[in-house]
Image (tube, grey):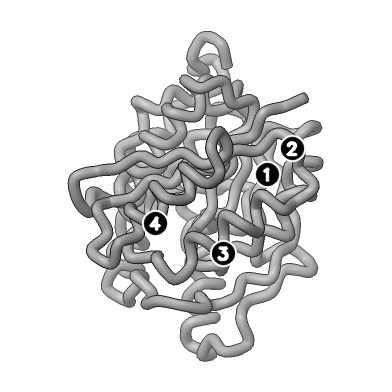
């Protein structure tokens, strides 16, 4: 039986984290644990996470960080923790319910024949929240289907999406020490490294809904900065081939 660790970075997610944990643990996934990586949230998310770790002992774990240190480092530290604690599969997702836990069983089932599975907004059947403005939808579509694909030439249709399940061997072979990005471009960088190393992706359609509670942290300035950093990702990793996989992956 494969052990799956779900890595969830949090910053001011007190309205969401308890509900999310309950929904994940209610899924028909027998050997799943959750790691909450909290960046010292001022709203008390870390304290709530500690309470969840007590009431759901062995199923919920908490990593406390000193402050807001970035999405990329939160995921990398979470991935390393999961690998160190014997995870066969590592699933990453947001805490705000834009990534619906109902897709987790299908993602885990699909990864058996692949190296990584993405919950995708841009494959057939994938959808964005109807409340998104036309501008926001176009910007997201353009970033994924045009900008990233033209520069990096990846086969993935949703390179910026953060709802993913990785096989242990994939993350080991990628060598997480290679990863340099720490903002929202982190998702693109992880995708590009994995594709350059020859890992097999699958994408399953999801409905990406806007967060139910709390405030979005993804502003226009952050999106523009991420778009420009795609060139850095290309410069750093375009030379990689499957021969560059780390030992064990």
Q: Are marks 1 and 4 in contact (CB under 8 Å)?
A: no
Q: Who's the residue at 52% across and 41% down the image? A: 60
Q: Residue furthest top?
A: 247
> Mark 4 falls on what kind of element?
helix
Horizontal side of residue 40 vs 140, given as left or right = left
Q: Nearer the viewer, mark 3 or mark 1?
A: 3
Q: Name the spot of residue 46 as percent of width and height, x first.
A: 33, 53
Q: Who's the residue at 23% across and 49% down the image? A: 69
Q: Name the spot of residue 167 as percent of width and height, x first.
A: 64, 30
What residue does disc 4 label? 48
Horizontal side of residue 119 vs 176, given as left or right = right
**Crowd band around label 2 with a 10 angstrom C-alpha radius: few (<14), some (14–19), many (20+):** many
What residue does disc 3 label? 19
Q: Who's the residue at 54% across and 65% down the image? A: 146
The foreground one among 11 and 186 is: 11
Give the distance between the C-alpha atoms of the residues marked 1 and 4, in whole angstroms: 30 Å
* Above-or-below relation of 193 to 14: above
> Mark 2 falls on what kind of element?
helix
Give the mark, 1 or 2, whose residue is nearer the N terminus. 2
Q: Are marks 1 and 2 in contact (CB under 8 Å)?
A: yes
Give the mark, 2 or 4, whose residue is nearer the N terminus. 4
Give the distance between the C-alpha atoms of the residues marked 1 and 2, in whole angstroms: 6 Å
The foreground one among 11 and 158 is: 11
Which label number is shown at residue 117? 1
Residue 149 visible from this viewpoint: no
> Mark 3 falls on what kind of element?
helix
Residue 59 visible from this viewpoint: yes
Give the distance between the C-alpha atoms of the residues marked 3 and 4, in whole angstroms: 11 Å
What residue does disc 2 label? 111
Q: Name the spot of residue 233 as percent of width and height, x first.
A: 36, 44
């Amino acid at each position: 039986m494969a052990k799956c660790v779900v890595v969830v970075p949090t910053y001011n997610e007190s309205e969401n984290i308890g509900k999310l944990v309950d929904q994940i643990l209610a899924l028909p996934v027998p050997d799943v644990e959750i790691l909450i990586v909290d960046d010292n949230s001022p709203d008390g998310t870390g304290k709530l996470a500690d309470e969840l770790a007590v009431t759901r002992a062995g199923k919920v774990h908490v990593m406390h960080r000193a402050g807001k240190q970035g999405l990329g480092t939160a995921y990398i530290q979470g991935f390393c923790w999961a690998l160190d604690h014997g995870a066969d599969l590592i699933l990453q997702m947001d805490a705000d319910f834009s990534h619906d836990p109902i897709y987790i069983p299908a993602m885990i089932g699909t990864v058996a024949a692949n190296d990584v599975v993405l919950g995708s907004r841009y494959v057939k059947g994938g959808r964005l929240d109807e409340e998104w403005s036309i501008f926001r939808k176009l910007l997201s579509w353009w970033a994924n289907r045009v900008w990233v694909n033209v520069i990096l030439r990846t086969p993935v249709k949703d390179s910026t999406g953060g709802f993913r399940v990785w096989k242990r061997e994939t993350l080991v072979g990628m060598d997480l020490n290679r990863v340099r990005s720490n903002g929202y471009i982190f998702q693109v960088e992880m995708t590009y490294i994995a594709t350059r190393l020859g890992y097999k992706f699958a994408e399953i359609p999801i409905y990406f809904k806007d967060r139910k509670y709390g405030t979005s942290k993804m502003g226009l300035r952050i999106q523009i900065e991420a778009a420009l950093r795609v060139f850095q990702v290309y410069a750093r990793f375009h030379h990689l081939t499957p021969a560059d996989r780390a030992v064990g992956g």
